[in-house]
């Protein structure tokens, strides 16, 4: 059996703090969007910010940036499945 | 060196210890399998008691033994126990654990400690569910589906019950991850994908559903708690929420969950039928493939529970169509089983009787499912006793009877002793008869318009309800005979050899009861799972 050797990557404190600050400012942005009337941009803006935030968390805090290909595929698979599930509810929500 | 091979010690007395800790902290897949077996089967018996009480209440119109509030709590707890504590964890946890690693020629699952942790999560979740019955506002009364808005408002102890189910969900996910990895990585030499026993195929498909669908249940349950504890308003239209969205979320998990129940059951049947028909399975590839097809397509049909919820007509069309699509792989299996029987030399022993009745009862359940899958007919029978009859045919007549078949087929292997055949057949006859009297009457009552989840009904429904309740007693008598016979046999019955049924899969090639490491050396597989001639069994 072959073993994919993934060296244990250690993320520096500096980087982690930077990511954390980034997340905090994005949270601030979400609050700002919520308090200002930006029309439909309200929903899409918040969703976009949420996506960036979860991307940061997955990449750095959950180490996905440093993991092997197999795990990335699994992440993609899980995301695809969630997208399909959510997508199917739109057969309902969009046509009510 | 000519050393005498000592017979390897069986997993029952390998550690030399016999106390409870040698079980609840064991990482041996066989011990964990038996832990799951006893705990899930114990809850099955609890559920049966509650079901019998429900039937006694419905024996005659008006109040018989309980009022409406108690009835609501009783059917809720009956449903929660049967679904989340028995049938979902039961088949993968008990027989998946006991049999699957041996069938692929492995010493254990890929992550034995994770396996033990799964059982502990199950046990902890079960304790939390039980605690919810006696604390706070008392047992939940929402039905096992926890629909909002009622579940967000009722004063009963929904939060704790939901937390328990949440924890059990994690147990299911971890079992799924473990089994997928095991089947990918730990197959013995020569155990190609085309030689996997069909039970393994079905456990494999099930494991994927467990991994991918169960997180959605977790999220849904967390949202109920957010609603109850924080008043989030997610499902409250007055505050921009959407109550129908709850039903989507719930069924995105809970429909695939019925495949977690039925797929392993189908796997048992696919393994039992060739052995007792003395013929290789017909259409091996199609059965294996249809398990995957059911798992995939079955994940996209959840909307068929929601035709009357106010969901859009477009969605009804899409979900109705897809529901009919899943019927195809299920029918493929039924045809293949029947073709396997054709011209076989059938021996009607207990495992086979349960397997054959599975085919009939599951077919009735599946075909009535099409009546519910077509929106035009479902609108009329939605939330009636027709539905109650239908899902008992699938979950009890299907998954339950397959569980009994597996008990008679595989437990002797692990105990080294066997039940008596005649009482087993008598028990089966009682159960089969009682079952049909009990649930067929329910379906007829539903067609006549009797709604589900009420403790009372119109007088015109009285005669059939009495018949149904009598059926439940016949079924109960059968269950008792089966239990007494089976357990008396397992502990004090006649010893059995390594291959009492003449099976060709790997579990029958090792000593009975299996040694701790299953195989003294890694087996090399040279023939298919139903190749009786090459396996050297007559
Ligand atoms: C002796 C055995 C059983 C009896 C007598 C029985 C009887 C009943 C009755 C009378 C109801 C409620 C009808 C109503 O809506 O008013 C019910 C509901 C239900 N049963 Fe059973 N049952 C039995 C076994 C099982 C098994 C083995 C399963 C699953 C594996 C099961 C799953 C359920 C579920 C999920 C519900 C729905 C609960 C709800 O409405 O929330 N039952 N049963
Ligand atoms: Cu369904």
Image: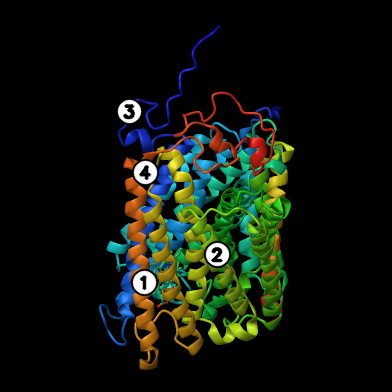
Residue that badge 2 annotates? B254
Q: Residue at x 57, y 42 (%)?
A: B503
Q: Is residue B110 left or right of residue A47?
A: left
Marks 2 and 3: which is nearer the front?
Answer: 3
Q: Find residue B106 and report its horizontal and vertical position in percent.
A: 58, 33
- Chain under callout 1: B
Q: Nearer the viewer, residue B404 or A56?
A: B404
Q: Which numbered marker is on residue B152?
A: none
- The reply to whether dot 4 and dot 1 touch (C-beta < 8 Å) is no
C-alpha span from label 2 to label 3: 41 Å
Q: Residues within 10 Å of mark 1 (few under 14, many from 20)?
A: many
> Are the residues flagged by discs 4 and 1 from a single subunit?
yes
Residue that badge 1 annotates? B472
Q: Is ligand 1 less than 8 Å from the beta carbon at label 1?
A: yes
Q: Is ligand 2 less than 8 Å from the beta carbon at label 2?
A: yes
Marks 1 and 2: which is nearer the front?
Answer: 1
> Are the residues flagged by discs 2 and 3 from a single subunit?
yes
C-alpha span from label 4 to label 3: 20 Å
- Chain under callout 2: B
Q: Nearer the viewer, residue B517 or B215?
A: B517
Marks 4 and 1: which is nearer the front?
Answer: 4
Residue that badge 3 annotates? B17
Q: Quadrant of the N terminus of chain A?
A: top right
Answer with mark 2 or mark 3, whichever residue precedes in sequence: 3
Answer with mark 4 or mark 3, whichever residue precedes in sequence: 3
Residue that badge 4 annotates? B490
Vertical placement of residue B466 versus B401, above or below: below
Q: Dot 1: what SS? A: helix
Q: Residues within 10 Å of mark 2 (few under 14, many from 20)?
A: many
């Amino acid at each position: 059996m072959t073993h994919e050797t993934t060296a244990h990557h250690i993320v520096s404190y500096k980087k982690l703090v930077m990511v954390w600050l980034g997340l905090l400012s994005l949270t601030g942005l979400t609050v700002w969007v919520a308090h200002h009337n930006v029309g439909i941009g309200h929903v899409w803006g918040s969703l976009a910010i949420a996506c960036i935030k979860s991307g940061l968390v997955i990449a750095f805090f959950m180490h996905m940036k440093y993991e092997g290909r197999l795990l990335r595929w699994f992440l993609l698979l899980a995301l695809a499945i969630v997208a399909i599930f959510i997508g199917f509810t739109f057969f309902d929500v969009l046509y009510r | 060196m000519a050393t005498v091979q000592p017979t390897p010690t069986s997993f029952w007395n390998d550690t030399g210890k016999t106390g409870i800790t040698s079980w609840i902290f064991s990482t041996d897949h066989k011990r964990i399998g038996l832990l799951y077996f006893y705990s899930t089967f114990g809850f099955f018996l609890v559920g049966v008691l509650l079901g019998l009480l429900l039937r006694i209440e419905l024996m005659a119109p008006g109040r018989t033994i309980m009022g409406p509030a108690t009835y609501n709590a009783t059917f809720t707890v009956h449903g929660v126990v049967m679904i989340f504590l028995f049938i979902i964890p039961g088949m993968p946890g008990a027989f998946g654990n006991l049999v699957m690693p041996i069938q692929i020629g492995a010493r254990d699952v890929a992550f034995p400690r994770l396996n033990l942790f799964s059982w502990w999560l199950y046990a902890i979740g079960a304790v939390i569910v039980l605690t919810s019955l006696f604390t706070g506002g008392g047992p939940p009364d929402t039905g096992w589906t926890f629909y909002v808005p009622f579940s967000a408002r009722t004063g009963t102890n929904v939060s704790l019950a939901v937390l328990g189910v949440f924890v059990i969900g994690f147990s299911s996910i971890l079992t799924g991850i473990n089994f997928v990895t095991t089947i990918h990585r730990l197959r013995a030499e020569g155990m190609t994908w085309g030689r996997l026993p069909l039970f393994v195929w079905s456990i494999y498909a099930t494991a994927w559903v467990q991994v991918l669908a169960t997180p959605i249940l977790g999220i849904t349950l967390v949202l109920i708690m957010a609603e109850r504890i924080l008043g989030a308003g997610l499902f409250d239209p007055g505050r921009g929420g959407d109550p129908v969205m709850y039903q989507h979320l719930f069924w995105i998990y809970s429909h695939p969950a019925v495949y977690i129940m039925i797929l392993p059951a189908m796997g048992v049947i696919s393994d039992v039928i060739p052995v007792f028909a003395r013929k290789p399975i017909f259409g091996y590839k199609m059965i294996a493939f249809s398990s995957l097809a059911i798992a995939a397509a079955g994940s996209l049909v959840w909307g068929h529970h929601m035709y009357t919820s106010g969901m859009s007509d477009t969605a009804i069309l899409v979900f109705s169509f897809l529901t009919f699509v899943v019927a195809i792989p299920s029918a493929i299996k039924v045809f293949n089983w029947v073709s396997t029987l054709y011209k076989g030399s059938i021996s009607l022993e207990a495992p086979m009787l349960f397997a054959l009745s599975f085919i009939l009862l599951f077919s009735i359940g599946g075909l009535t499912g099409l009546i519910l899958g077509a929106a035009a007919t479902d609108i009329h029978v939605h939330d009636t006793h027709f539905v109650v009859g239908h899902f008992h045919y699938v979950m009890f007549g299907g998954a339950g009877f397959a569980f009994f078949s597996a008990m008679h087929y595989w437990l002797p292997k692990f105990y080294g002793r066997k039940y008596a055949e005649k009482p087993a057949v008598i028990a089966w006859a009682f159960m089969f008869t009682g079952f049909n009297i009990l649930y067929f009457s329910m379906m007829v009552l539903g067609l006549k318009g009797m709604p589900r989840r009420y403790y009372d009904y119109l007088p015109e429904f009285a005669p059939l309800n009495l018949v149904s309740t009598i059926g439940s007693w016949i079924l109960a008598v059968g269950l008792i005979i089966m239990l007494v016979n089976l357990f008396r046999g397992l502990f004090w019955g006649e010893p059995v050899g390594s291959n009492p049924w003449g099976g060709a899969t790997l579990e029958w090639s090792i000593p009975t009861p299996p040694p701790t490491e299953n195989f003294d050396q890694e087996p090399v597989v040279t023939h298919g799972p139903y190749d009786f001639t090459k396996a050297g069994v007559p």
